[in-house]
Image: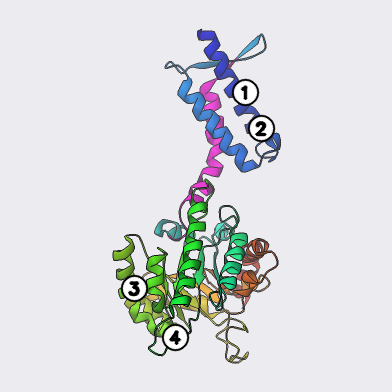
Amino acid sequence: MGLNRRHHRVHVVAVVLVLMLRMHSGIAFGISKETAHCLTKTSFNHANQRRSKDNDIMVCTESSSSSSLSLSSLSTTMENQDDSNSKSNSRQKISPWSEERRRYYDRSDSEDQQDRHYYLCVITETNACDSMENVEQTIRTLERALGTFNTHSIDLISIRVKPPLLSDGVISDQFQERIIHLATQIMTMKAKHQSHPLYNDYKVVINDALNLQAAMEAKIDGIHVKEKDAKQIPYIRSTLYQHLGKEIIVGTSAHSITSAVTNYQLYKPNYMFVGTCFLTQSHPEKNSCDLEGPTLPGLVKKAIRKETDGAHPIIFAIGGIESENCHHPVGYGSDGVAVIRSVMQASDPALAVKFMKEGMKTSIRSSIKNIQQD
């Protein structure tokens, strides 16, 4: 009986060794590198649970031949193999919105810039709730952009709509229903993503305090308020927290260093949209001379950190951002970018997200060098 049990353990260890050897090639029995890594850890943990108390040696036998393998040696090899991935895996499982992860990305070690997380916000088009057809189209586009588990790590979805107001200044019931439906469907989508073991966390907000009721009904993550309405942030945060009983994020916009610093000191928004960086259809009234430019987001972040001993909201550069130019504001110090049409009107939204993320990451070093030369 004892020998049979050891034979069971032999099989487990054999699988572990094969997976270990093939993990880096990413072709372990036709599965991905990440899946091979997970299977290896699972097999090793299972073997650990079944081994005997003396824990000295596991006998590995194939057919009728036998050989011995030190469990401690296997354990050391596995731990060394896992160690290189454990740091990145643990960071993946920590929300990019957590203070722990943000402190990690705020470190000043320039050699680790490639390892940083560059934030991406996808904003819906303003006509997303003008009709149920638009609502459904928006949902389908976001589904494609997010993939199975937020594959390419979108960090924020901002539902930006412009509801037509009735004569008494309130939103019509029909429009309100469409907003709630859109927000609810996105949160349902998020709940499905959260069940995936490789889920990358993201937040969902809706613009304007006018949509506070919709935010509460859809159990959304937060609200984005206009720059001129930043004083509403404490009330919005308190109201949503009391109603939903969960952590709430509130963001605002900034078009100048002074406004950004003042609003952060007074109201502590979780994030800011800072721009306008480039020419954009969202602000057709602005020509190239009116733009705040791609340097402003980094300057805002630097000014806020100076006034708050390093604390700052997540800074999203906004305005005319595309995969071809997204590295510019990031190179000047922005935490990431916010986009609308680059994703929402893309023929392949998931690929657009991937290119945007890669654009920020792969171009960062050249941008830093250019800034240093300037």
Instruction: Compare marks 3 and 4 and give the one earlier in the sequence.
Output: 4
Residue under label 1, please give it. Answer: 14
Q: Residue at x 47, y 21 (%)?
A: 50
- What amino acid does circle 3 point to? Ile
Residue under label 2, please give it. Answer: 21
Q: Would residue 338 be found to the left or right of residue 325 on screen? A: left
- Looking at the picture, how far across and down is residue 309, in whole percent? 36, 70
- Magenta extent: 68-97
Q: Of residues 191 and 134, which is closer to you in this image?
A: 134
- What amino acid does circle 4 point to? Leu
Q: Nearer the viewer, mark 4 or mark 2?
A: 4
User: Is residue 142 placed above or below 70 in the rendered structure?
Assistant: below
- Looking at the picture, how far across and down is residue 259, in whole percent? 41, 84
User: Is residue 225 placed above or below 23 in the rendered structure?
Assistant: below
Figure disc tally: 4
Residue under label 4, please give it. Answer: 165
Q: Which mark is residue 346?
A: none
- Asked if one can make out residue 311 in the rendered structure from this viewpoint, the answer is no
The Cα atoms of the two marked residues, 3 and 2, are separated by 53 Å
Instruction: Compare marks 4 and 2 and give the one earlier in the sequence.
Output: 2
Residue under label 3, please give it. Answer: 236
